[in-house]
Image: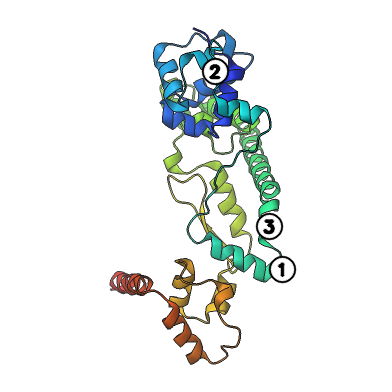
Amino acid sequence: MNIDPKKLNAIRTAKGLTFKEMKKRSGLSLRNLKKLESEKEGKDVKPNKRTIDGLCKALGVEPGHLSGELDLPPEVYKKAEGEPTRRSVSLRFGRKQELELIQRVYRVSAEQVMNMAPFLFVLMAEGSLKWRREMVQDIYDTLHKYKNANHLSFAHTRNNWGADFHMFLDFEDDSISSRDIFGESLQDNEIVHGVDTSFRTENGNPFSDYLCKLAKEISEDFLEVYSRYGDELPSYELLRGEMEKVCRGNHLCREAIRWGDFSIKDIPEDLDDIEEFNAWVEANTSQNTKDLDASFRQLREEIKI
């Protein structure tokens, strides 16, 4: 049985699944999944039973849907006919408060921020690819400059060391050319010339590295970014200085906003007296948040000790 690349793409798109989500659900490699959807290569692929079963499990369809023997599922037709589909997108913990801070500082609406998000993402993605291209070119130039380094003693301890460098650079070139910002195409385990060339996202990824680098070039009062292993996107904290102004140094206020007990807009503007402000925060913070804040404070004290 052959798989129709267009049918497979239509079903995956209608289900709202990314290649990475498909990989997790199907147990297939990213390379194979992309190959199966390729109009040039997909028609020539002879998938085995494991591949077909994995795709059917991931997409919730029958093999005939993938080959074209059966009509496409109803939701795919709805997508093709232009019927609006809705997919919920959730913000990470603490992001809603930062939307409020952005509105407050830059005098823009939440709608304007959300509408600019696709443009800003492409800007960052293309910036990261440009950064990687420049680094790869720098390494190529250095290798060419020291092309006679194989006469040095360390080169004799490993055969063909220069070829290894070029092999890794070729993989990086391919990843950049395909706009693979997270380096996902390098995740499949490969052994070339006895060297493990696989890329593992638990060690971070090039896009996250670029965002961290970019953030360091901006004042930390406005943007602090730190990469956590295993996450595609780095964790970040925006406009910390502005939040300090809002909460007037009251740590409980920050936690209450973060946990959703109240928003920045809920804080009365006429609380000029600091004692009145602190009393208002205390009265409007849930007991759960107070308990969490106390636990965090105790933990920080123990770490100091």
Rendering coords of residue 73 (x, y %): 54, 23
Q: Earlier in the sequence, mark 1 or mark 2?
A: 2
Q: Earlier in the sequence, mark 3 or mark 2?
A: 2
- Residue drawn at point x = 54 percent, y = 25 percent: 167
- Residue drawn at point x = 42 percent, y = 82 percent: 283
Amino acid type of disc 2? Leu
Determine whether 274 is above or below 293 in the image.
Answer: below
Determine whether 183 is above or below 93 in the image.
Answer: above
Determine whether 244 is above or below 113 in the image.
Answer: below
Mark number for residue 111? 3
Crowdedness near tag 3: few (<14), some (14–19) or many (≥20) residues, C-alpha within 10 Å: few
Picture mark count: 3
Amino acid type of disc 1? Arg
Rendering coords of residue 181 (x, y %): 59, 38
Distance from label 3 to label 1 (Cα)? 12 Å
- Residue drawn at point x = 51 percent, y = 23 percent: 33
Q: Secondary structure at mark 1?
A: loop
- Which residue is label 2 attached to? 36
199 left or right of 172 in image? left
Q: Nearer the viewer, residue 300 or 149?
A: 300
Q: Is residue 267 visible?
A: yes
Distance from label 3 to label 2 (Cα)? 38 Å
- Which residue is label 1 attached to? 107
Distance from label 1 to label 2 (Cα)? 47 Å
Determine whether 62 is above or below 79 in the image.
Answer: above
Amino acid type of disc 3? Glu
